[in-house]
Image (cartoon, rainbow, N blue to C red):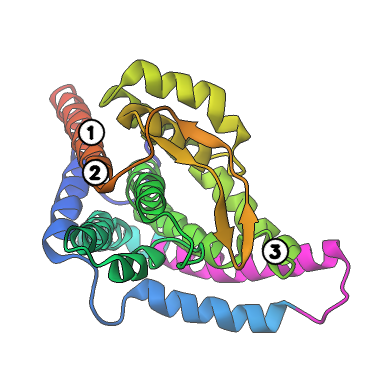
Amino acid sequence: MIIQWNTDNSLITISLIALVAVLLDWLLGEPRRAHPLVGFGRLVETIETQCYGRLGLTPWRQRLQGLFGVLLLLLPATTLAFILAQQPFFSTPFSLLICTLAIGHRSLYQHAQAVILSQQRGDDAQARRFAARMVSRDQATMDVNRATTESVLENGNDGIFGALFWFILAGAPGCLLYRLVNTLDAMWGYRNQRYRDFGWAAARIDDLFNYLPARLTALSYAILGDTKRAIRCWQRQAKAWDSPNAGPVMAAGAGSLAISLGGPACYQGHWHERPQLGEGSPPNVDDIDRALRLISKSLALWLILLLLAGAISYAYA
């Protein structure tokens, strides 16, 4: 069921806005200056300074202060978006703007292509620098192809399909809320000493918002590649991954591409033994491009199905 979110909430309108937003994102990319999420990130840092509290607080007190910070950051922006989405003659352009800004297909492609081109030129140092912009593991010890392929597959959900899912379900307010939740998780959702308790609410809310989109993304990856292998890897391997949503997405993506991901990785000087995802050889530079193509095909599938659903609903309205 589509939530009532503007003066024309028909599925055909939603599908057309989504299509135009995807095209605009691909043509224009992210704003080079003054991206709204950059401003939101600075606000997150300010709220963290005010809400974090002193050292020595109990874990539950830290969690409560983190939850307060999350609500302080999310509720005003989402409420404003809901009000703006209700305004006649403004709801459609506003929804298009939010959806376009929330989708990061072009940005993901550009970041991954920078790694690919650097490796094709034989510039390993530059490839590592570009890959380090996509992942948080240590640059000097990372497996560039593995790290980049993992990031591409995971961010297919976080940067594209999750935003589309919430736009379809709840319009511009839902899409904006998802993107803000995702940004908060990226800043507070770590399991280190500083954020284990303070960032608990941000991480759990992000898990909730990504639960269905991640599984639809995993299903898309499976359908458009080695389906049997992808489903098998998803069923057997995803639950061993530390993230309940990244596990299905990356396991299905790796299985679909018949490559092996996971394994040891170094974060802030500490090695972590991660379970294997997928089946096959470790990824090479061509597999990064294959992962990008898998995302593009999945996005095309989503848009085709959405447009068909919109056309059918329009025909029988």
Badges 2 and 1: C-beta atoms under 8 Å apart?
yes
Crowding at dot 2, Cα within 10 Å, few <14 / some 14-19 / many 20+, comes out as: many
Q: Which mark is residue 14?
A: 2
In the rendered view, does 205 fall on the left or right side of 182? right
Q: Which residues are magenta?
A: 53-81
The quarter of the picture where residue 208 lies is: top right
Where is the N terminus found, in terms of image quarters?
top left
Along the viewing direction, whichever of 87 and 178 lies nearer the viewer = 178
The residue that mark 3 highlights is 192
Q: Earlier in the sequence, mark 2 or mark 1?
A: 2
Q: Nearer the viewer, mark 3 or mark 1?
A: 3
Q: Nearer the viewer, mark 3 or mark 2?
A: 3
In the rendered view, does 201 fall on the left or right side of 45? right
Please determine whether, in this image, residue 283 is positioned above or below residue 103: above
Residue at screen point 35% across, 74% down? 36
Instruction: Name the amino acid, label 3.
Output: Asn
The quarter of the picture where residue 283 lies is: top left
Magenta-drawn stretch contains 59: yes
The residue that mark 1 highlights is 306
Along the viewing direction, whichever of 182 and 10 lies nearer the viewer = 182
Magenta-drawn stretch contains 252: no
Instruction: Name the amino acid, label 2.
Output: Ile
